[in-house]
Amino acid sequence: MSGRIITFNGRTPRVHPTAFVAPTATLIGDVEIGPESSVWFGAVLRADHPENGIRVGARTSIQDNCVLHVSARGPTIVGNDVTVGHGAVFESCTIEDGALIGMNAVILHEATIGAGALVAALSVVPTGMHVPPATLVAGSPAKVRKTLEGESAAWVKDSAAHYVALSREYLEQGISESGNDNA
């Protein structure tokens, strides 16, 4: 484990031993990172609400410069095999298994992204929106554009495995050890 792990209000982030946390990632408070998941450079997961935390499932990647937070409206839950693109922002929402969130997308309070769905880059999913499974949503505010099938659905499904493999390479090279490159 690496990164900045900060206890807040008596709650310390919990990171599975097989997870990769980049040296410049920051986890604060009631955060849980599942097996073979990855939290990349500059990401901040801040669970400082007294009742609601952040849960990241297995084989999920939270990429560079993402911000995950919570509020009184609920926890932030990210399922298994989810890919979260660079710079995405989440606040008290649910991302179901196998979804792919594009770069710089914003998912607001009480929104739910269905299993295997794709949120296009730069989209804003409004408060309370429920994105159906295996669909593409895009825009600001986001709207359902189509059902994912064929090559698009396969691309979303296969994305998580790529980041699990890449994070294993970082771990093998000691990138996360002691927060130092190749320590």
Image (cartoon, rainbow, N blue to C red):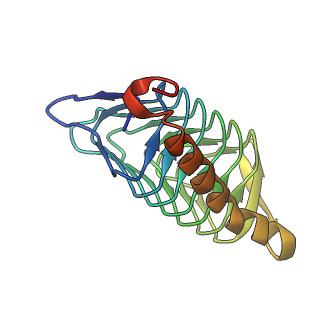
Q: Is residue 153 left or right of residue 24?
A: right
Q: Position of residue 167 (x, y in %)?
A: 56, 47
- Residues 130 and 5: in front is 5
Q: Which residue is at a point 71% across and 59% down the rendered structure image?
A: 118
Say which quarter of the image contains residue 70.
Answer: top left
Q: Residue at x 34, y 52 (%)?
A: 16
Q: Who is closer to the viewer here, 92 or 179?
A: 179
Q: Name the residue rendered at 22%, 29% in the picture.
A: 7
What number of labels is visible?
A: 0
Q: Judge left or right: residue 57 versus residue 84.
A: left
Image x and y of residue 40, in percent: 55, 36
Front-most of 114 and 101?
101
- The answer to whether residue 45 is above or below residue 152 is above
Q: Does residue 147 appear in the picture of this structure? A: no
Q: Where is 92 relative to 157, above or below?
A: above
Residue 131 visible in the displayed image: yes
Q: Which residue is more in the foreground, 176 or 24?
A: 176
Q: Position of residue 82 (x, y in %)?
A: 57, 58
Q: Left or right: 42 with respect to 92?
A: right
The quadrant of the picture occupied by the C terminus is top left
In the picture, the quarter occupied by the N terminus is: top left
Residue 76 appears at what percent x and percent y?
41, 48
Task: Kindly give the residue lying farthest to the bottom in the view shown.
Answer: 150
- Taking the image as shown, residue 157 lies to the left or right of residue 15, namely right
Residue at (41% x, 32% y) in the render: 177
